Image (cartoon, rainbow, N blue to C red):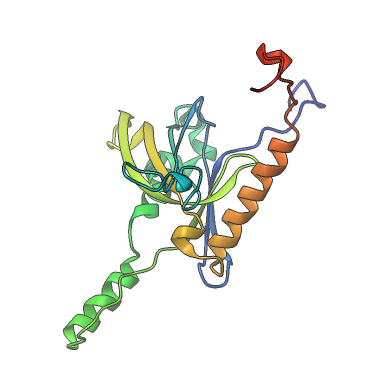
Amino acid sequence: MTSFPNSPRLLKAGVVLLDPSSGQVLRVISLQYNPDNLSRSLQMQAIAAEGADRSEALRLKGPPVETFKLEAEIDATDQLEFPDTNRNVVQNGIHPQLAALETLVYPTSAALQANNALAGSGALEIIPMESPLALFVWSKQRAVPVRVTEFSVTEEAFDPLLNPIRAKVSIGLRVLSVDDLGFSHRGGSLFMSYLRNKESLAGKAPGATLASLGLEGLP
């Protein structure tokens, strides 16, 4: 028990997998440790380009392309000190935690077999497999639909059975906006909630005056 009973509960960052049609929660994956850094970039989607009409200079085609990059650490060293109460870790190391994250970029074996059966039966058109909708959650202020764009693992330590027991996972994510999913898609509505929340937070930012910028007025 913590010696500070009134300390705030530490929230975990993670990914929620949803059924893209019904929105049903299929799985919740929390990171063992919250990463120390979260890199973000926004690429503006503007109409303005060389040779474009000057009247279009301030117009936007849609939301910016937003990306996240983070590095998550997974470590079973402490759990291995108590093998009697952590049998799964003793037998498998951190394979299960790595597998849960890696399934974000794999189609299911059932979907692969179904498409193979269609191909074997002579189907002329096989629809690409649809993955669950991934929702990246970094606090209640930031819950947004994403697609994994980069995924790499560095395994740093192993047990006597060569199970990994410590690893770093680097993950790149691209936010899926209404431009990608449409307004009627479950992910589209989640993106709009994310955008409205961002606008609400912006409204709470401290205001400034022209004088604070060294200006007496605008020409």
Q: Is residue 140 in sight in this rendering?
A: no
Figure quadrant of residue 206: top right
Residue 132 position within the rendered picture, expressed as x and y whole percent measured from the top left: 45, 63
Please give left or right for residue 104 compared with residue 31 in the image. Answer: left
Please give left or right for residue 184 compared with residue 114 in the image. Answer: right
**On-image quarter of the C terminus:** top right
Viewer-side residue, 159 vs 172: 172
**On-image quarter of the N terminus:** top right
Please give left or right for residue 111 compared with residue 11 in the image. Answer: left
Residue 15 position within the rendered picture, expressed as x and y whole percent measured from the top left: 52, 48
Against 211, is 35 above or below?
Answer: below
Q: Is residue 12 in sight in this rendering?
A: yes
Figure quadrant of residue 192: bottom right
Residue 52 position within the rendered picture, expressed as x and y whole percent measured from the top left: 36, 47
Residue 171 position within the rendered picture, expressed as x and y whole percent measured from the top left: 39, 39
Name which residue lies at 54% across and 61% down.
187
Name which residue lies at 50% across and 65% down.
182
Q: Residue furthest front?
A: 219
Against 219, is 110 above or below?
Answer: below
Viewer-side residue, 72 vs 21: 21
Q: Residue furthest right?
A: 6
State how many labels appear. 0
Against 112, is 152 above or below?
Answer: above
Figure quadrant of residue 108: bottom left
Name which residue lies at 49% across and 52% down.
62
Against 128, is 159 above or below?
Answer: above
